[in-house]
Image (spheres, helix red, strand yellow):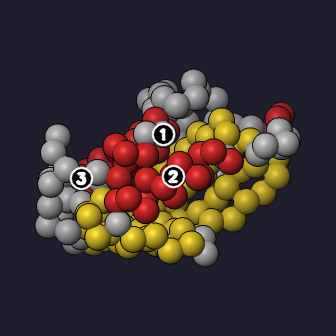
Amino acid sequence: MTDDFRPPFPPFTIETAAMKVRAAENAWNLQVPENIALAYSVDSQWRNRSEFVTGRAEIVAFLQRKWASEQQYRLIKELWAFHENRIAVRFAYEWQNASGQWLRSFGNENWEFNEKGLMQRRIASINDIFISEEDRLFYWEWKTPRPDHHPALSELNLI
């Protein structure tokens, strides 16, 4: 795969939009910022919570900072809606902070893709809640994709 094209390409169908969502989930669960950045256009613009990021180098730096503080990160994304070159996603992830406290973060993302299948805009709104170890729901090996048999967000009834 080159860094110039990232199939599937818009306009999206339900199948290709779902493929984009799962590919993004898998990549983020592997936690290799340099590989993740290749799915974005060289001038990609992000809003992540209150932080604004532009371009692949800033995406890599952002993800390195993120995973330095969000340990044991495990993410599930779910397709919410799509139209032409845009996809809306809802997601949740569980992680542990430096003091050992578990959190679950809930959010929504709006994605916009260019004709080469690269994401050119990512807008993410995210909220965190503290959870106990017993309340965790995301169990699979760290830094690996979510297994196909692991329940999705809807199956876990996470809203």
* Sequence order check, earlier mark of 2 and 1: 1
Find residue 95 and report its horizontal and vertical position in percent.
Answer: 69, 43
The single residue placed furthest to the top in the displayed view is 141
Tell me how far mark 2 sits from mark 1, CA to CA. Answer: 8 Å
Decide: few, some or many residues near mark 1? Use Cα within 10 Å; few <14, some 14-19, many ≥20.
some
- Tell me what residue is drawn at x 24 percent, y 52 percent: 16
> Where does label 2 land, which residue?
63
* Sequence order check, earlier mark of 3 and 1: 3
- CB contact under 8 Å: marks 3 and 1: no
Find residue 97 and report its horizontal and vertical position in percent.
Answer: 76, 45
Asked which secondary structure carries label 2, the reply is helix
Q: In the image, 16: left or right of 152? A: left
Q: In the image, 145: left or right of 40? A: right
Look at label 1 and name its amino acid: Gln
Quarter of the picture containing the C terminus is bottom right
- CB contact under 8 Å: marks 2 and 1: yes
> Where does label 1 land, which residue?
31
Q: Nearer the viewer, mark 2 or mark 3?
A: 2
> Where does label 3 land, which residue?
16
Look at label 3 and name its amino acid: Thr
Answer whether residue 30 is visible to the viewer in this image: yes
Q: In the image, 55: left or right of 3? A: right
Q: Which of 1 and 8 is in front in this view?
A: 1
Position of residue 103 relative to residue 10, above or below, is above
Position of residue 140 relative to residue 121, above or below, is above
Quarter of the picture containing the N terminus is top left
Q: Which of 131 and 34 is in front in this view?
A: 34
